[in-house]
Amino acid sequence: MFLDMTLKRNPKLIKYAVEFHRKAEIRPNSYILDMDTIKSNTGKLVKSAKKYGIELYMMTKQIGRNPQIASIIAEAGIEKAVAVDPWEALALGRAGIKLGNVGHLVQIPFGMIKEILTYKPEVITVFTLEKAEEISKLALEMGKKQDILLRVTGTKDTVYEGQVGGFKEEELIQKAEAIEKLKGVNIVGVTAFPCFLYDSYEGKIHETENAYTVVRCAEKLKSKLNIDVKQINMPSANAIASLPLMKELGATHGEPGHAITGTTPLHGIKELDEIPSIVYVSEISHCFENKAYVYGGGHYRRSNVDKAMVGRDFETMKNNVLKAQDISPEAIDYYGTLIIDNKKALVGDTAIYSFRTQIFVTRSEVVLVEGIQKDMPKIIGIYDSLGKKLR
């Protein structure tokens, strides 16, 4: 999905990824991250967001909840993280990363609320009155009052399987009135997901109906309950290219993830401000009946893998690109499959991919490299897919 653009805009990343693998300094099934470019992308995002008056939380799940990367992003200007599930919140909070928004895609289980509150999240997103009650009770016991966002949903909204939930628009005021009576929480805004999506036909990022639902619900909270709505959070496809649209619609907060690594779908077809900064490295295990099988473990079902460069040196690999074959959803990805046809593939060859990542759902290793752009590459850390340092 991003291989051609990465080769065009960040060839050194691919070059040094190959060299690290050939020297056996990294293993197959590893993601290589160009920390220099990630830092630069973050700086660009921060500068543009300030121009439009939008606050940003960093998304880290797609890069494996990695605390070292999060720290570097924070130093570059996005100081707080959005944790889409409570396990991510704990991993980042324990590592000293400031928490912005917790609980948006996955609500916090009652037994985990107390510890997460100790990390002082700026906001917690709730789907139900019951969850707000749980948070309020524990916050009061700790002598706190926690700011919360209400996740809202309208009848025409886009909702992904496995992510259903929130306050129905027609029930919002009734539920919000009940929450306002709780002493340990304070409603400060609304959110939904996804508020923006990439349109492959037009090659543009468009708002979804969810974005309009968020705006309507914010206005209802203001006009009917006199709530001071400080945050209108519109996540998904948040990047420099979508910031003007976010501002136009009234967003106050965004949650860039793939923009930080230059890998939103739009980055695959256009040379945008953010530059691709991540590749996936594997190795050919064996060949069988015109197919090369590479060590797997790093893909997820929406990664849109389409091809890989194969070989043992960067220059040769540029001209030896093999088409990828999708794996069935019923299968375990022990191996990835490449079609050999008239190309070359040998056991032990390096394979370089670039695709849409969600590292936290893989069993990959995550390799942080600095100095790539200065031709002085140095591995500064190797982690598992959930942010634990390995070596």
Image (cartoon, grey):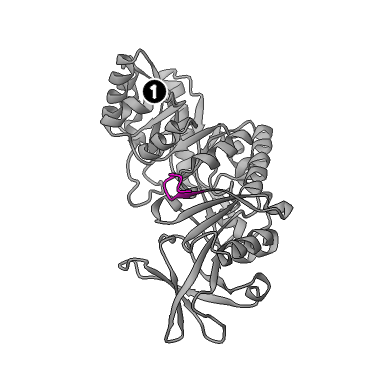
Q: Regarding mark 1 in the picture, which secondary structure is present there? A: helix
Residue 83 located left or right of residue 19: left
Closest to the observer, 148 or 367? 367
Report which quarter residue 169 is drawn in: top left
Q: Is residue 383 magenta?
A: yes
Tell me where residue 327 appears, x and y as whole percent: 39, 70
Determine whether 186 is above or below 266 in the image: above
Q: Is residue 368 magenta?
A: no
Residue 181 visible in this rendered orientation of the protein: no
Tell me where residue 219 appears, x and y as whole percent: 47, 28
Q: In the rendered structure, which amino acid carries the disc numbered 1? A: Thr
Name the residue rendered at 66%, 76% in the picture: 316
Determine whether 106 is above or below 17 in the image: above
User: What is the quadrant of the N terminus in the image?
Assistant: bottom right
Closest to the observer, 230 or 64? 64
Report which quarter residue 331 is drawn in: bottom left
Magenta region, mostly helix, strand or loop? loop
Determine whether 113 is above or below 273 in the image: above
Determine whether 140 is above or below 370 in the image: above
Tell me where residue 231 appears, x and y as whole percent: 50, 28
Closest to the observer, 121 or 240? 121
Residue matched to label 1: 118
Tell me where residue 187 appears, x and y as whole percent: 41, 23
Give the extent of the magenta segment: 382-391
| Residue density around tag 1, few if under 14, some if 14–19, many if 20 or more, within 10 Å | few
Residue 56 visible in this rendered orientation of the protein: yes
